[in-house]
Image: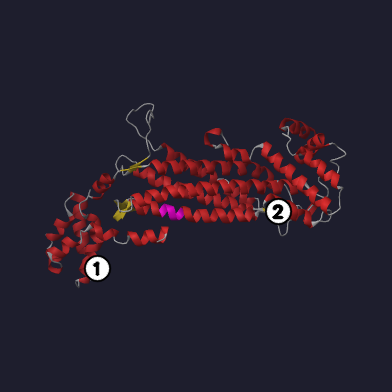
Amino acid sequence: MIPRYSRPDMVAIWSPETKFRIWFEIEAHACDAMADLGVIPRENAEAVWKAKDVEFDVARIDEIEAVTKHDVIAFLTHLAEHVGSEEARFVHQGMTSSDVLDTCLNVQLTRAADLLIADLESLLAALKRRAIEHKNTVRIGRSHGIHAEPTTMGLTFARFYAEMDRNLSRMRDARAEIATGAISGAVGTFANIDPGVEEHVCDQLGLVPEPISTQVIPRDRHAAFFATLGVIASSIENIAIEIRHMQRTEVLEGAEFFSMGQKGSSAMPHKKNPVLTENLTGLARMVRAAVIPAMENVALWHERDISHSSVERMIGPDATITLDFALARLTGVVDKMLIFPENMLENMNKFPGLVMSQRVLLALTQAGVSREDAYAMVQRNALKVWEHRTDFKEELLADADVTAALSPEEIEEKFDLGYHIKHVDTIFARVFGE
């Protein structure tokens, strides 16, 4: 992933240096377990740990791989250069390359998941703070982009909080599912290595043994992991789209923070564009782009092929690095977001009183008017407001059919804004707890 959309902690997980360090730990822990079982001499296992503080030379490993055309063999050759060929002769005993590659990948994905979980927790804190801050800040709710009925800005933030809280649960589940390792040898039968070696290596790396592997860890786990990233990315876009809508000139109910010295356009000095949330929409597309390849990786030939390998070398770093950046960016947007309550009320009253139509409809039916007649009575007055920007309440008061069923006082009462937010506390208790 390009540096523009990367954060250092997540990038470090996918660096060659980190990868080779994990490979080393897998091999060294496996040697310890084999020594405990009496399969290899204890002194050979201890000799491997001489490389525990070594900075593995990535360029040297690449140089060896240029000849061997095999990355794991290149690493093992380089490891022997540090440990000594005689001391390292039992390294990788009974193992196959996928034992190292797959176990390492899952270590990297669990570490990436830990960062993403922390990102989600930070975003949730920001969403909760803004929800409480604007709990009773009234704004118009929209369906199909058209004014519907009043809601609050706090409920908007609370809705996004609940969605991201579900994503946090999904991410934790995905982490648990991906946190498996396999040291089971060629085709996964443990023919040349004891299952106890796998148990020891996994325990040391914070994984659990894969119940049954072939020569690879089953890729349905990875498909579920990347699908979870895709869902989280879609939720990011969901929030970003709302903020982008709110920042439209004709709406301007909320906006991204515009910093001192920031420029919105090279041509038009007046512009304040929602560039961060537009960027988030684009980044969400890139994360979702990893989902289908991950699902296509599930179907491998027999006990193993490597059609999944090139895919995962790209989508592993790219999807996690991009999502990490996107979550952090969204947290900043939410945290600093500008809210304009006066514009919310002005927008809601653009067609005076129109958004109270359902209350009038229900009152007419309760007064004995059939629903069909009540709907027609309310709609004909509502259309006048649409067409002539008149006041909905005044149109109703001038309609003899309406006033025959409802008194002026009853009509007036139907325009109480507080009616629409009377259950906000109940909803907040459901989302955030009592």
Alpha carbon distance from label 2 to label 1: 69 Å
Dot 1, crowdedness within 10 Å: few (<14), some or many (≥20)? few
Quadrant that contains the C terminus:
bottom left
Q: Main secondary structure of the magenta part?
A: helix
Give the extent of the magenta segment: 159-163
- Residue 369 showing in the rendered view: no
Residue at image mark 2? 203
Q: What element carries label 1?
A: helix
- Residue type at numbered disc 1: Glu
Q: Which colour scheme is used?
A: secondary structure
Q: Is residue 16 magenta?
A: no
| x, y percent for residue 71 | 75, 39
Marks 2,1: beta carbons within 8 A: no
Q: In the rendered view, does 433 fall on the left or right side of 226? A: left
Residue at image mark 1? 372
**Label located before the other in sequence (2 or 1):** 2
| x, y percent for residue 137 | 30, 51
Q: Does the magenta stretch include residue 162?
A: yes
Q: Which of 94 and 243 is in front in this view?
A: 94
Determine whether 89 is above or below 417 in the image: above
Q: In the rendered view, does 138 fall on the left or right side of 91? A: left
